[in-house]
Amino acid sequence: MLPKNIESFIKEHHVMTLATISNNMPHCSNLFYGYIALTGELIFTSSVSTEHGQNMIDNSNVGGSIVLETKMVGKIRGLQLKGRATQVAGDNLSDARKAYLKRFPYAIFADLELWSFNITSAKLTDNRLGFGKKEIWNRGE
């Protein structure tokens, strides 16, 4: 399970930047996400025909970030993530769909190609606790 501060930050927001790579070339995409607390997964939808979709098929190692945009230095907060992205299928599809639609109910009629970002490490920067104050978490496996 993710630490409470990191999980709270994830729940407060709904857009992440996903970073993928293919042939030594990076690519970033901004995506809406849902969250499954029990497994520490971010759930998002994307077509396999997109550049980042193809990149994730070729290399499931991904990075991500979620930020609070503010000009006030003392309120800056941001989360940097590492993990694995996989297409959701089978028994996991129902839980992933519920998590995504809980955040974005208007997507109920959309053709959702769901993916899971299984978080393996996270670094939360929270300047409210002091300039550059960080909390680092790594999944123990």
Image: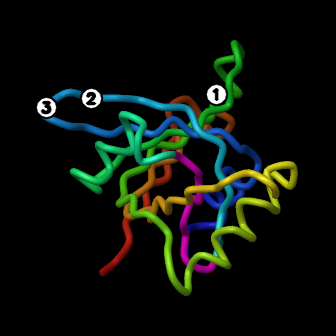
Q: Quadrant of residue 27?
A: top left
**10 Å crowding of disc 3: few (<14), some (14-19), many (20+):** few
**10 Å crowding of disc 2: few (<14), some (14-19), many (20+):** few
The part of the chain drawn in magenta is 38-46
Q: Identify the amino acid type marked 1.
A: Ile
Q: Is residue 70 above or below residue 110?
A: above
Q: Is residue 106 above or below residue 20?
A: below
| Spatial CA span between label 1 and label 3 | 31 Å
Residue labelled with disc 3: 24
| Spatial CA span between label 3 and label 2 | 7 Å
Give x and y (percent) for residue 113: 56, 56
- Residue lying at the far left of the rendered structure: 23
Q: Is residue 133 above or below residue 87?
A: above
* Residue in view at x 50 percent, y 39 percent: 65
- Residue lying at the far bottom of the rendered structure: 91
Q: Identify the amino acid type marked 3.
A: Asn
* Residue in view at x 41 percent, y 48 percent: 48
* Residue in view at x 67 percent, y 77 percent: 95
Residue labelled with disc 1: 76
Residue labelled with disc 2: 26
